[in-house]
Amino acid sequence: MNPDPLWYLYLIRCADGSLYTGITTDVQRRLDEHRHNRGARRLRGRGPLELVYSLPVGDRSRAQRIEHRVKRLRRAAKEALIAGRLSLPVPE
């Protein structure tokens, strides 16, 4: 029996400077999918795409809760998270 996969939170910076937040079990695979216009429509045609943040966050449920919290952050807070000046908003 395989253990549950480890999920990652990631942030991608688009060519226009906007930030995209997502979760995955394989960050490089997911980044490649985004770069080849598979996956999130919001990223299509917005390249080049740069991975600017990635962190293992646990199981899928926890990853989804953290993703939701990060998506609600203002841009300045996301930039602080990327720079390491803000801790990841973890659910209780």
Image (cartoon, grey):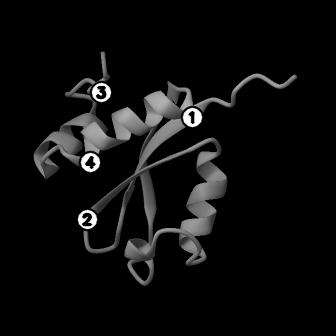
Q: Quadrant of residue 60?
A: top right
Mark 3 vs mark 1, foreground winner is 1
* Chain-order first, disc 3 or disc 2: 2
Residue 51, x across and y down, in percent: 46, 53
Q: Marks 3 and 1, Cα distance to the nearest angstrom?
A: 15 Å
Q: Marks 4 and 1, Cα distance to the nearest angstrom?
A: 16 Å
Labelled pair 4, 3 in contact (Cβ < 8 Å): no
- Give the residue drawn at x 55%, y 78%: 37
The answer to whether residue 50 is above or below residue 23 is below
Q: Which residue is identified by label 3?
A: 88
Identified by mark 4, the residue type is: Lys
Q: Which residue is identified by label 1?
A: 7
Q: Marks 2 and 1, Cα distance to the nearest angstrom?
A: 23 Å
Q: Which residue is identified by label 4?
A: 71
* Chain-order first, disc 4 or disc 2: 2
Q: Which residue is identified by label 2?
A: 18
The answer to whether residue 90 is above or below residue 33 is above
* Chain-order first, disc 2 or disc 1: 1
Q: Marks 4 and 3, Cα distance to the nearest angstrom?
A: 12 Å
* Chain-order first, disc 4 or disc 3: 4
